[in-house]
Image (spheres, grey):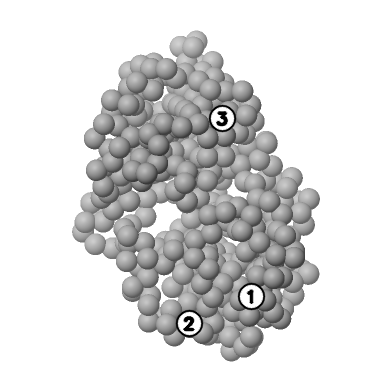
Amino acid sequence: MRILSTLSYYHPHWTGLTVVAQRLAGGLARLGHDVTVLTSRHDPRLPARERLNGVRVVRVPTLGRVSRTAIMPSFPFALVREVRRSDLVHIHTPMPETALIAAVARVMRKAVLITHHGDVEMPAGLGNALIKRIMDTVIRTGMRLSDRTVVHVADYRDHSVFLAPVARKIDPIYPPIEVPPPQPDRVEAWRRELGLDGRPLVGFAGRFVEEKGFDFLLRAMPLVRARLPDVRFVFAGEKDVSYERFFERCRPLYEGQREAIVELGLLPDHQQMANYYGMCDVFTLPSRTDCFAIVQVEALLSGTPLVTSDIPGAREVVRVTEAGRLVRMGDPSSIAEGIVQVLQDPDRYRPKQEVVRSVFDPERSLREYEALMRELLRVRGGS
């Protein structure tokens, strides 16, 4: 198959969406398909064209950003050119150009598949409300024009108000997730370098944005420390996010717990991230919303149990592996209780590697995507 994959940001940009898109593109290329990625040239130092892991990457120049959106005036011209040489167009949403891409593909009689990585969530404010309404409209229009949409888990599809009008066209497929095993010697050395030997460590990671619920965790920290005074909370991610000033709102809470927080910054190296998970005794995801956080599976594959908000999508990993605790979303006392229980009874919640690997098999995910794409081409060819 000749597959065109479209998304706003690609490697080396680092989010869960880009990681999944990169693994899908590279995996399908490894299976013998001709895969092109059309994306933004968000950093002018990046090449306009290159080949990464067997994938042809085409980057469109940008004129800056509005919120999270890259402005790409020449995108429609590049899109027509790349759609023409493709059999199937694979759109990763949220993406502002979703409706345009799907419409161009339909006009050119190409199959269209969308992978929806999560509904658009924005902070409060009139401007953000307008952005959300526009994004919701273009994404849902694209879904109506597409042949099928994939979400990571059925639980999210079945509870999303946004997806309800198009739910009949949605298939759940777990994303392909891979992480190298932690390196025990380096994990122990890292603990010593940070002065964390002998301390229970609670990990949390990602961009410091409202939907991740880190403010709930900050409020839970003193409750955990009251019962486990030696505990430390290890953060891997970015605090200062240009399109959202949530950290500034949380600064008083953060400063109040600073002595218990260890900051590592963004860890874009897969091995370094695996060692981070291996260093932590529990990994927590206190999100307000989350379609499916791949960091949870990566943590389990590194031997670290979870404490996760009991919300659609995010709770899937704990439900199917039983390697952690589900806690009430937005409830610091519930989050604290979950963390303490896992730290005090680690054997009960320690992930069983064979279970995690059998449930979240990246090769099966790739084959399911491949089979769905072939079916879409078969149906379109016969229509």
Q: Single out the mark in the foreground, 3 or 1.
A: 1
Q: Are marks 2 and 1 in contact (CB under 8 Å)?
A: no
**Image quarter of the N terminus:** top right
Q: Single out the mark in the foreground, 2 or 1.
A: 1
Q: Residue furthest left?
A: 126
Q: Quadrant of residue 142?
A: top left
State whether residue 370 is above or below residue 7: above
Q: Quadrant of residue 185?
A: bottom right
Question: Mark on residue 193?
Answer: 1
Q: Could you tell me residue 4's position as x and y percent?
A: 45, 27
Q: Is residue 20 left or right of residue 301?
A: left
Helix, strand or loop at disc 1?
Answer: helix
Question: Mark 3 and mark 1: span between their CA atoms?
Answer: 38 Å
Q: Could you tell me residue 192's position as x and y percent?
A: 67, 76
Of callouts 2 and 1, which one flags the residue occurring earlier in the amino acid sequence?
Answer: 1
Amino acid bearing label 2: Arg
User: Which residue in the protein does label 3 denote?
Assistant: 54
Are there few (<14), some (14-19), or many (20+) residues within 10 Å of tag 1? few
State whether residue 38 is above or below residue 129: above
Are there few (<14), some (14-19), or many (20+) residues within 10 Å of tag 3? some
Of callouts 3 and 1, which one flags the residue occurring earlier in the amino acid sequence?
Answer: 3
The residue positioned 57% from the left and 34% from the top of the image is 53
Question: Mark 2 and mark 1: span between their CA atoms?
Answer: 18 Å
Q: Residue furthest top?
A: 382
Helix, strand or loop at disc 3?
Answer: loop
User: Which residue in the protein does label 2 denote?
Assistant: 258
Amino acid bearing label 3: Gly
State whether residue 377 is above or below residue 193: above
Q: Could you tell me residue 147's position as x and y percent?
A: 45, 26
Amino acid bearing label 1: Glu
Please say whether residue 271 is visible from this viewpoint: yes
Q: Single out the mark in the foreground, 2 or 3.
A: 3
